[in-house]
Image: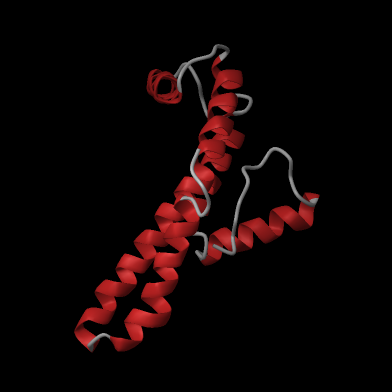
């Protein structure tokens, strides 16, 4: 097994190095590219931390929604095909919850600082405390 630090912690250190040490020393023309690189490193670290849980939860929701087990890409393709054929409509039990939870999980990884996403998390927390059926979010990242 690997010793610590592992992937996400290493990526966090690289992003910190870029932001705190290198960016202040760069010429103005290179600062934007370095910020893009730091943001990409942050995104990779969030993905490493969160994607397994997000995909497992999506697979569980799709298994319940479609009535059988399978791997995530196959279940997603089947849901899309059923929607296109009209076999499942927007009122189908669990569909809206699945789509909403999937969207929030993707935003937690890709855009955790996105203002509408953060407001939505606050509203969800106000309504029900920490919702047990919502994906795990890490809005500080």
Q: Residue at x 47, y 46 (%)?
A: 48
Q: In the figure, is residue 73 to the left or right of 104?
A: left
Which residue lies most toward the top here? 68
Image x and y of residue 44, in percent:
40, 53
Image x and y of residue 33, in percent:
25, 73
Residue 102, above or below 110: above
- Residue 122: which quarter of the image? bottom right
Image x and y of residue 50, in percent:
53, 45
- Residue 116: which quarter of the image? bottom right
Which residue lies most toward the left here? 29
Q: Nearer the viewer, residue 96 or 72?
A: 72
Q: In the figure, is residue 132 to the left or right of 29?
A: right
Labels in figure, total:
0
Residue 2, above or below 124: above
**Could one spot residue 60 in this view of the protein?**
yes
Image x and y of residue 72, in percent:
45, 25
Which quadrant is the C terminus positioned in? bottom right
Q: Residue at x 54, y 66 (%)?
A: 115
Residue 90, above or below 26: above
Q: In the figure, is residue 46 to the left or right of 132?
A: left
């Amino acid at each position: 097994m690997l010793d610590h630090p592992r992937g996400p912690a290493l990526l966090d250190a690289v992003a910190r190095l870029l932001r705190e040490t290198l960016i202040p020393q760069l010429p103005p023309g290179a600062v934007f590219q370095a910020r893009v690189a730091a943001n990409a490193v942050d995104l990779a670290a969030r993905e490493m931390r969160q994607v397994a849980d997000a995909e497992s939860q999506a697979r569980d929701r799709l298994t319940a929604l479609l009535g059988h087990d399978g791997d995530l890409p196959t279940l997603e393709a089947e849901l899309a095909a059923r929607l296109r054929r009209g076999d499942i409509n927007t009122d189908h039990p669990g569909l809206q919850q699945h789509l909403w939870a999937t969207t929030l999980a993707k935003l937690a990884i890709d855009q955790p600082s996105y203002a509408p996403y953060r407001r939505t998390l606050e509203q969800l927390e106000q309504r029900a405390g920490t919702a047990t059926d919502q994906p795990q979010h890490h809005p500080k990242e």
